[in-house]
Amino acid sequence: SVLLDLLRGGSALAVLIGHAGQLGFLGRDWPLDDTFQHAGVVIFFVMSGLLVHQSAGRDGMTLTAFARARMVRVLPVAAFALIFGVGVYHFLLWYRPEATLEVDPIAADPATILAAAVFLSERAGFLEPVLNPPYWSLCYEVWFYILYGLALFTRGNLRIAAMLCAASLAGVDILLLLPTWSIGVWVGAQGSKVRIGRPRLCVAGAVAGFAMVSWSGVPHVLLFLIRRIDPDLGTLRFSNYCVTDTVAALWVAIGLIALRSTRFDPSRLRHVGRWAAGISFTLYLTHWPLLSGMATFVPPSWHLCRALLAIVGPITFARSARHRCHDGGTNAAIPERSGQCVR
């Protein structure tokens, strides 16, 4: 729907803004922390589960067809993002070596890139691909797809064995956020059966609840308490906020269900929504290398110029590159997945 397109595009923009602020493009006193952009990923996960459920429910869908559809959707953008990140890294290393001192050189090694190419870079002990921390959520989603496809299209002992094998390969970190994605699947399967009496009030409540859970400091407080109990439980990288992420995903689900019952007609925004959703995936996976390059070439004293470039530059690049990445928008044969961050 148009509202889903707008939500996806808006979430991608929020991730971009959050990272631009994190990297110092929006002033020294950027007031938001990592939970701002991480909340955008939670929204993406819920929408991804919803849309993948719709895709899997098509007539004649099989495990092979499902896997092919997911690969066609993901692989071109993943390959482009990895190659682009490595290319920007080596260019910056050549142009100004000190610009990349904070990047572990091992992150650009063939072994690290290969692990990312097969979506294993989020397992414990692996490094994220160079200049692309946001790639983490794509690895999560691919394993969500695999687990969901096996659960839906296999039977009996084969299903049990295949899912155990996939879960073992995915790792604990990814499994901890599986409920967040699965909530989107539930919305796709059962959301239409839920009746909302006061949908607008419910939407407002869902927005407030999501903001409270995500941005009130609760994730950091809970993480602090968990680390007091067991320090090892606080080293789950992007799954550190798994408890509050699940609650936030429930609020997103409530909001999506309530939106179906509102009388708001967003048809006038159809073209804007389609355009925003169409670039969201590419924008999400290419903005970090671009921001890294801008940080090297644009002087810190150019405050306004840096801020404008940090927002307009990645959007313009995503618009021009999305066709090369097959980021085809809502008219694509395969429903859009969420585009996604560093938290």
Image: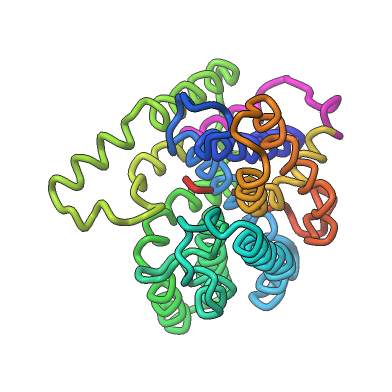
Q: Nearer the viewer, residue 343 or 296?
A: 296
Quarter of the picture containing the N terminus is top right
Q: Residue furthest left?
A: 229
Q: Nearer the viewer, residue 204 or 171?
A: 171
Q: Nearer the viewer, residue 221 or 87?
A: 87
Give the residue at x 25% y 38%. Answer: 222
Q: Is residue 339 visible?
A: no
- Residue 269: in magenta span: yes
The x, y position of residue 236, in whole percent, is 32, 56
Magenta-tinted stretch: 251-271
Answer with the quarter of the image where residue 247 lies: top left
| Display coloring | rainbow
In the rendered image, the vertical position of residue 27 relative to residue 128, given as above or below: above
The x, y position of residue 102, in whole percent, is 45, 55
- Position of 244 with respect to 301 (left or right) is left
Answer with the quarter of the image where residue 35 lies: top left
